[in-house]
Image (cartoon, rainbow, N blue to C red):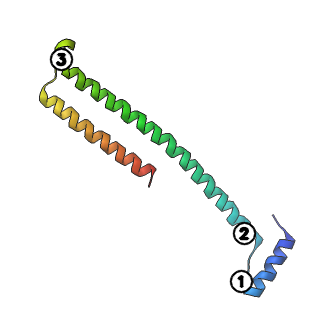
Amino acid sequence: MHNSKLDDLLKEYGDSNGDSIDANEIDYNINLTKQEISDRIQDRNERKKYAYRTFIFLSSFTAAILLIIIGAGFSRALNFNLNDGVLIALITSSLASIVGIFILVMRYLFR
């Protein structure tokens, strides 16, 4: 993309300041800036999508663990029995998993 009037004006301006400015370089920088804006928009959309997916996954994981704990609470009515050690291990490991996944994903998405 060659614009002779713009090049002439830039040469006059560049000669008066001792710098040489090229219209092609300006066009290149503008296109690069447009690409950076496009990349940031795409990143933002991806962040929204993966933040939503992470929320759904963690919510369903928490609901499954909660159902197991409630089932263990109504062990006589549901005929579902878990030892106390198993419940403690289930609660602590699931809590560590939920917090770990949340921290990893959020740190990656919003750094």
Q: Residues within 10 Å of mark 2 (few under 14, many from 20)?
A: few
- Say which quarter of the image contains residue 80: top left
Type of residue at label 2? Ile
Q: Which mark, residue 75?
A: 3
Determine the residue located farthest toward the right in the rendered image: 5
Residue 25 in the image, given as x and y percentages of width and height: 72, 70
Residue 63 in the image, given as x and y percentages of width and height: 33, 28
**Label 3 to label 2, Cα distance in Å?**
73 Å
Q: Nearer the viewer, residue 24 or 76?
A: 76
- Which of labels 1 and 3 is toward the front? 3
**Helix, strand or loop at disc 2?**
helix
Type of residue at label 3? Ser
Residues marked 3 and 2 touching at CB (< 8 Å):
no
Left or right of 17? Residue 53 is left
Residue 109 in the image, given as x and y percentages of width and height: 45, 49
- Write down the residue under mark 2: 26
Type of residue at label 1? Asp
**Helix, strand or loop at disc 1?**
loop
Depicted 110 relative to depicted 52: above or below: below
Q: Residues within 10 Å of mark 3 (few under 14, many from 20)?
A: few
**Label 1 to label 3, Cα distance in Å?**
82 Å
Residue at x-position 40% and y-position 48%: 106
Residue at x-position 42% and y-position 33%: 56
Depicted 3 relative to depicted 21: above or below: above
Q: Which mark, residue 44?
A: none
**Label 2 to label 1, Cα distance in Å?**
14 Å
Q: Which of the marked residues, 1 or 3, is nearer the chain's N terminus?
A: 1
- Write down the residue under mark 1: 19
